[in-house]
Amino acid sequence: MDDILTVRNLKVYYYTRKGVVKAVDDVSFSLKKGETLGLVGESGCGKTTLGMSLLKMPSPPGKIVGGDIVIDGENIVHLKETTLRKRVRWNKISMVFQGAMNSLTPVYTIRKQMLETLQNHREMEYEEALKIIEKYLGYVGLSKDILRRYPHELSGGMKQRVVIATALFLEPKVVIADEPTTALDVVVQAQIINLLKKLKKELGLSFIFITHDLATEAEIADRIMVMYAGKVVEIGENVQIYGSKGPMHPYTKGLLGATPRLRRKVDELAFIPGVPPDLLKPPSGCRFHDRCPVVLDKCRENEPPLKEVELGHLVACWRCYDE
């Protein structure tokens, strides 16, 4: 499969009064056509910052200070804001933001909000735009009757489906889903996951699925990318991370060890001691070395590169290379 998205050495820093926060620091990866890439890690590791930066809209005072973002063969890092709005955002790449209730304006009907988004990106008559909106509402299992409703009249699952439909109706090639099942009950979570799998199959979409829930990623993702303290520490196929051999990086092993399973007792759950490092002053060497149970001396001083240790499996860990 050809790569629809390629990210090379991306750096996104927040310039604060206390100093520079290196939220995304030299991150590289690719996304293939029709693939779902799962992005996981602890809160504050840079997942959402990376997702927002792929649309070239990191939250202020964040700035992209280096690297390339190539979408459908075009590097968008140096494009002007007007060009990005017209040709890239929602046309080539879109995003389902975390918390659907925060993405919808409470004083506008669903019709007004969806029409405004569509007509701001493409010039079309009202009737034509309405037909497109109704088509994509049908894709996500909603009737056109909800268009006259306000957000507070919809359930959490219905609001999430509206946001997904809004992210799709300009037919982008890449969709970023930032924790789309957060704050939903388990039944609705399953419905949303099954919906995304269905849309991927029917529309040939490529997804980046952001979450801290490894169990959810096991269900939906083709490949897994694990971030820690602004760095990518492991990338692998689903079977390489969740299969019998398991992950290779100690951090990924710790995350999986802390994930509840049906046949695992509560007292068998593991945990990762300590807290993530301060990204105002990130530690030397491997950023995980203070919490790592198998740390080597070289880990404290020398940063490990992200290297391919087997076909399609990349790890940033000195112990993995030595072994």
Image (cartoon, grey):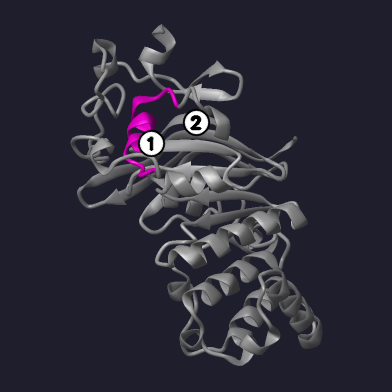
- Badge 2: few (under 14), some or many (20 or more) residues near its Cα, within 10 Å? many
Residue 149: percent from the left, percent from the top?
57, 90
* Amino acid type, residue under disc 2 in the picture: Ile
Front residue of this view, candidates 283 and 35: 35
Image: 268 above or below 194: above
Whether residue 250 is in magenta: the answer is: yes
- Between 257 and 235, the one nearer to me in the picture: 257
Q: Report the amino acid beneath label 1.
A: Leu
Residue most extreme to the top: 322
Per the rendering, the mark at residue 256 is 1
| Circles 2 and 1 in contact, beta carbons < 8 Å | yes
- Identify which residue is drawn at 72% across, 66% down: 170
**281 or 165: nearer the eye?**
165
Residue 260 is one of the magenta-drawn residues: yes
Instruction: Tell me the element at label 2.
Output: helix
Left or right: residue 90 versus residue 20 is right
Q: Is residue 128 above or below residue 183?
A: below
- Find residue 259 and report its horizontal and vertical position in percent: 36, 42
Residue drawn where x is 71% and y is 77% of the image: 133
Can you say which quadrant of the picture contains the N terminus?
A: top right
Q: Which is nearer the N-term, disc 2 or disc 1?
A: 2
The foreground one among 188 and 229 is 188
Give, as a single range, the part of the protein colored magenta.
Answer: 247-261
Q: How many marks?
A: 2
In the displayed structure, does residue 239 sit left or right of residue 41?
A: right
Q: Quadrant of the C terminus?
A: top left
In the picture, the disc for residue 89 is none
Name the residue at 57% across, 48% down: 220
* Residue on which the image places disc 2: 241
Image location (x, y in percent) of residue 281: 23, 36
Q: Using the numbered discs, state the Cα–Cα distance from disc 2 to disc 1 in whole angstroms.
A: 9 Å
Would residue 207 be found to the left or right of residue 211 on screen?
right
